[in-house]
């Protein structure tokens, strides 16, 4: 049973062009992206953790935390949500549960990555899961879907960790598992992208590619990239704005000095859906 959000996401993947996603971090940012007609929203693990739990990008965040955030996002905004599903939060069986819970929360696409999560700050980078283990997890993720319209994305950092031939071998193996897109983490050069595109016909997604690649949508599209995530600038801008506002007031600054930086009443009304709820009141309230 597909949903309009999942159908829209699949339409983006099927086009021969590259679409810019909105890198969101909570329900409010998702609502604003929806207002601006972004077709895809992407929730990364790093900003999702700090925005919703106030913790850094390390294992202080579990599957239930992510599911809760996703449920609140899809209730707040009618968006096609792709997200960082970490490593499935464990082994292949854990991955089955992760996919089913995220799918039930209304997510359109779920990335399962081959990075092994760090266990402590400053600890040794554990690298990647073995190819065999990751293939099993991806097969489990694909089989776990109750809605075949949900897209499973194989996220790989092999380009950053392995020689190119080994990275391409992994990507080819991942592409045979039934996943419907590949996410490239750690992409460094156009030559790498071209090699990946020759290896698989699956749609590609990338986060913050090198400027000479990322700034040219035509190059991305020609090499199979269907979704571009441009880092997390909105999150950084918001953090600085909140910090500067509180600091200004704490130091005795005048409230009026902030007027030019505030959202207008009309924008706030649009973001919080005031008119929608007034209509509900008018329709259903009885005196």
Image (cartoon, rainbow, N blue to C red):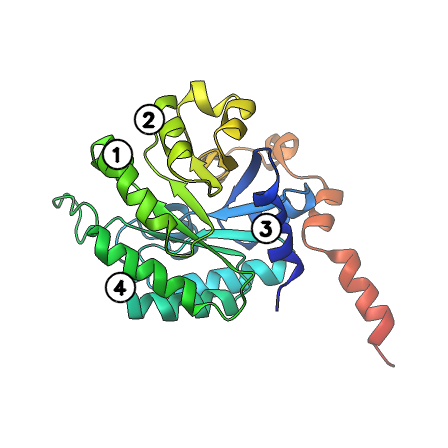
Q: Residues within 10 Å of mark 4 (few under 14, many from 20)?
A: some
For disc 2, the marked residue is: 188
- First in residue order: circle 2 vs circle 1: 1
Of badges 3 and 4, the one in the foreground is 3
Question: Residue at horizontal 54%, vertical 30%?
Answer: 221
For disc 3, the marked residue is: 10
Q: Nearer the viewer, residue 251 or 216?
A: 216
For disc 4, the marked residue is: 90
**Image position of 26 with respect to 190: above or below:** below
Number of the label disc, if any, that sits on residue 160 = 1
| Separation of residues labelled 2 and 3 (CA atoms) | 27 Å
Using the rendered image of the protein, determine whether residue 42 is visible from the camera's viewpoint. yes
| Mark 2 vs 3: CB contact within 8 A | no
Q: Nearer the viewer, residue 18 or 69?
A: 18
Q: Residues within 10 Å of mark 2 (few under 14, many from 20)?
A: some
| Separation of residues labelled 2 and 1 (CA atoms) | 8 Å
Left or right side of 14 for 151: left
Q: Nearer the viewer, residue 130 or 110?
A: 130
Question: Residue at horizontal 20%, vertical 32%?
Answer: 163
Using the rendered image of the protein, determine whether residue 247 is visible from the camera's viewpoint. no
Q: Quadrant of the N terminus?
A: bottom right
Of badges 2 and 3, the one in the foreground is 3
| Separation of residues labelled 1 and 4 (CA atoms) | 22 Å
């Amino acid at each position: 049973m597909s949903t309009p959000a999942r159908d829209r996401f699949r339409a983006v993947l099927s086009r021969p062009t590259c679409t810019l996603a909105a890198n969101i971090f909570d329900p409010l940012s998702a609502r604003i992206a929806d207002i601006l007609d972004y077709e895809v929203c992407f929730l990364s693990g790093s900003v999702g953790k700090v925005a919703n739990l106030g913790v850094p990008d390390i294992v202080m965040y579990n599957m239930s935390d992510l599911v809760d955030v996703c449920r609140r996002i899809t209730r707040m905004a009618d968006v096609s949500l792709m997200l960082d599903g970490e490593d499935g939060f464990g082994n292949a069986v854990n991955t089955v549960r992760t996919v089913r819970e995220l799918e039930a929360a209304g997510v359109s696409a779920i990335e399962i990555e081959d990075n092994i999560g760090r266990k402590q700050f400053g600890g040794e980078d554990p690298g990647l899961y073995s190819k065999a283990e990751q293939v099993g997890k991806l097969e489990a993720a694909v089989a776990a879907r109750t809605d075949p319209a949900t897209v499973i994305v194989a996220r790989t950092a092999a380009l950053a960790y392995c020689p190119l031939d080994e990275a391409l071998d992994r990507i080819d193996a991942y592409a045979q598992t039934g996943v419907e897109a590949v996410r490239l983490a750690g992409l460094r050069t156009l030559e790498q992208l071209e090699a990946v595109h020759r290896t698989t016909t699956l749609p590609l997604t990338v986060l913050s590619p090198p400027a000479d690649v990322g700034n040219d949508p035509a190059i991305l599209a020609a090499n199979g990239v269907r979704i571009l995530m441009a880092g997390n600038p909105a999150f950084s801008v918001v953090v600085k704005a909140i910090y500067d506002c509180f600091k200004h007031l704490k130091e005795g600054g005048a409230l009026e000095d902030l007027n030019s930086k505030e959202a207008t009443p009309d924008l706030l009304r649009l973001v919080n859906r005031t008119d929608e709820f007034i209509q509900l009141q008018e329709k259903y309230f009885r005196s």
